[in-house]
Amino acid sequence: MGERVEGLLRDLAPQALGAVVRRYGHFDLAEDAVQEALIAAATRWPATGVPDRPRAWLITVASRRLTDLLRSERARRRREETAARQQPPADRPAPAADQPGAADDTLTLLFLCCHPALSPAAQIALTLRAVGGLTAAEIARAFLVPEETMTRRISRAKQRIRESGIPFRMPSPAERQARLDAVLHVLYLIFNEGYASTSGPALQRPDLAAEAIRLTRIAHRLLPRDSEVTGLLALMLLTDARRPARTGPGGALIPMAAQDRSRWDADLIAEGVALVTRALPRGRTGPYQIQAAIAALHDEAPSAEATDWPQILALYGVLRRISDSPVVALNQAVAVAMVQGPRAGLDRLAALAADRRIAEDPKRYAVRAHLLEMTGDVAAAREAYLAAAERTTSLPRKRYLYGRAARLPVGG
Amino acid sequence: MKYMILLYGSQRDYDRLAGAPVDEEDWSAEQVAAMYEFMAAWNQELVESGEFVDARGLAAPAQTRRVHGLKDGVPVVTEGPFAETEEVLAGYTVVECASVDRAVEIAAKVTKSPNPGFDQGMYVDVRPVLEGAGDLGGDPEV
């Protein structure tokens, strides 16, 4: 019962918050009010049972609480007239809007949390707080910052929304695409943070990768026809599917070619492949879909040798035309090496030495080392592995790279 | 009161931990895993007792940039300014607890880490954290 209530509340939280903000404004106070309604529900429902219309219940309780908060706020410092006009009538019957609008409210909330007036760090924190329903303490632990820091970051973000008078409504058609891209980028960053931190010494951190997938599933449910939302969800599932095989004992990194593919999550792969297959022929072809298609080709290969590298190389070609990312260029160099041979890949890498964004990146040295090893130039490969290890800050990655170097004889 | 527990290490310690080619024996994957596990459990215990505030590990000393004063209007930057065996700050954990005795008790636990260094004279420091203007003597009422 307790778990069922918890799951239900997490789904309803952004809908209730969205509904309250849409009606009364005051995003910052509404957020507090909805939190209190959620706490009331979490303590009461397991004993009394879930009400017939749980969403309406939450909205009613939160609206009443918001009224109180607005009153005390007014008492404390005389509020401008606008606030008075926006004040909810105390006994307004709770929301008829139990059906339509609910989904839109969650989506509008997502757009609001990822508003360009906020810094990326604030967008992420606010999204996890307001849409994800995580507490400030949980978000703080996920990002390894003190709780006070996260609490301040969230309240500053809410203040910023209040001060800049950002309205609670869907972006106009003209700006919708850019705003949706911002939302997807925030979800992508949350996923990456979770995925990258799954190795090494760590506290028990809330699983941000799982949270990002949950939020992206919501976005996908709300925008089922947007091929980039679908693509991002597919990319996350297809990447997360490999997580069980990614690290060995003690958090040692295992490169994809050496992973035990039987440990990959077949259900996630099947779901991801189905999503990307549906998304690809439809709508604009964006970077998430293409990355998902690449991930699908890796996930579907029965072995590293059997990977469809020509197809992957073709997809990197498409991706490069729409993305200037040097990391994409680096991955493309790997694909070139797998199709045309390591020398061709090394030529691509040499060209990247002129790109300041990645020239001194340990990843470039690591790829160089792998490709040199493929050519049989073990002395040069060893040097490149050492150079990559010295530039890496992550201890598991250092161990992996020094380990590769140690396998190769000095002086070839 | 908050206390910072400071942990130290040299470039050589980092190299052994990372399995870099050095004269001394490297740590095995199992040893590294055991230490990670120990440190994670130590931190987790503090999270659960409510005493945990913040913890960070620092990258290897060789990756330090030391910024000196301006020379001819340009800051002078030295890379990796430490000797290989020089002990420098490697990480810290900030706790909030009732007394310095409790902070010392917490710190004493970390010296039981499966890290050979503690048998060879390695230590941690416990330092009280100043909270604000009052502690710094800027508040006239204090």
Image (cartoon, coloured by chain):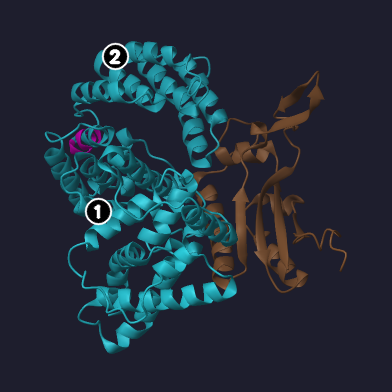
Chain colours: A cyan, B brown
Q: Position of residue B3 (x, y in %)?
A: 72, 62
Please indicate, yes or no, whether residue A261 appears anywhere in the rendered image.
no
Residue nearest the viewer, comparing A124 with A201: A124
| Residue at the spot of label 2 | A341
Q: Residue at x 77, y 51 (%)?
A: B121
Vertical comparison of A211 with A270: above or below: below
Vertical comparison of A325 with A202: above or below: above
Secondary element at tag 2: loop
- The amino acid type of the residue labelled 1 equals Arg
Q: Mark 1 lies on which chain?
A: A
Q: Mark 2 lies on which chain?
A: A
Residue nearest the viewer, comparing A32 with B54: A32
Marks 2 and 1 sit apart, C-alpha to C-alpha, by: 39 Å
Q: Which residue is drawn at 22% across and 61% down?
A: A101
Residue range highlighted in magenta: A294-300
Please indicate, yes or no, whether residue A286 appears anywhere in the rendered image.
yes
Horizontal relation, residue B56 to residue B122: left or right: left
Q: Residue at x 74, y 33 (%)?
A: B82
Q: Where is residue A267 in the image (x, y as percent from the top left)?
A: 18, 51
